[in-house]
Image (cartoon, grey):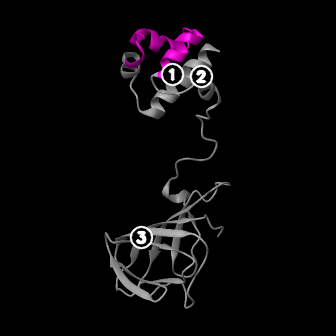
Amino acid sequence: MADDVGARLRALRNFRGISQRELAKRCGVTHSSLSLIEQGKVSPSVSSLKKILDAIPMSVGDFFTMDLESRDQVFYSADELADVGSGDVVYKLVGANRASRALGFMIETYPPGADTGREMIAHQGEEAGIVLEGEIEITIGAETRTLGAGEAYYFDTNVPHRFRNIGKAPCRLVSCATPARSF
């Protein structure tokens, strides 16, 4: 039990970005006592634990029920990003393997002349992005604009839209869309 309480407390403290010394100061417990609790060498009384958690702040009930461990993959190397693009367009999707993915977060690459297709696309949700390099022509409804590096967009995706690289260099952008689409 002490190991579990100490490990949970350390994880929560780190998650909240509070140093051990700062938490000890906030709750009036000595730094060494807090250290021993986190190492699982000392089991705090319920009143001591409540005093510590009040300084975070968090209830004792939430402390024991809060999920501090991620069950899904969190970090991805470049070769783990799934390419869900078609044709010449490369869409590197972050978190493609997450069953409960709520958004689509991608690094998109459009070679010169590449586009999302002749037909405009429309689907429920929102999309935002920023151009990292090159330029991209984006048509949203009746409005068309060419964006360059550092410029961004945000729109409702139920409005028909199209992306097209009309430049001579590849265009790379980072985008995020909700809800997550299955590719």
Residue of label 2: 60
Give the crowd class for mark 2: few <14, some 14-19, many >=20 residues within 10 Å. Answer: some
Q: Amino acid at mark 3?
A: Leu
At x 46%, y 89%, the residue is 142
Would you identify the image quadrant in which residue 124 lies?
bottom right
Q: Position of residue 14 (x, y in %)?
A: 46, 30
Residue 52 on the magenta segment: yes
Q: Position of residue 109 (x, y in %)?
A: 45, 74
Q: Amino acid at mark 1?
A: Leu
**Could you tell me if residue 143 is visible in this image?**
yes
Which label number is shown at residue 173? 3
**Could you tell me if residue 39 is visible in this image?**
no
Front in this rendered view, residue 1 or 95: 1
Q: Is residue 170 above or below residue 82?
A: below
Query: Most extreme residue toward the right, as rendered?
Result: 99
Which label number is shown at residue 162? none
Residue of label 1: 53
Magenta stretch bounds:
26-54
- Kind of element beneath mark 2: helix
Q: Position of residue 56 (x, y in %)?
A: 46, 26
Asked if the residues shown at circle 2 and circle 1 are in contact, with their CB atoms under 8 angstroms apart, the answer is yes
- Kind of element beneath mark 3: strand
- Kind of element beneath mark 1: helix
**Distance CA(mark 2)–CA(mark 1):** 7 Å
Give the crowd class for mark 1: few <14, some 14-19, many >=20 residues within 10 Å. Answer: many
Give the crowd class for mark 3: few <14, some 14-19, many >=20 residues within 10 Å. Answer: many
Q: Amino acid at mark 2?
A: Val
Quadrant into which the N terminus falls:
top right
**Distance CA(mark 1)–CA(mark 3):** 43 Å
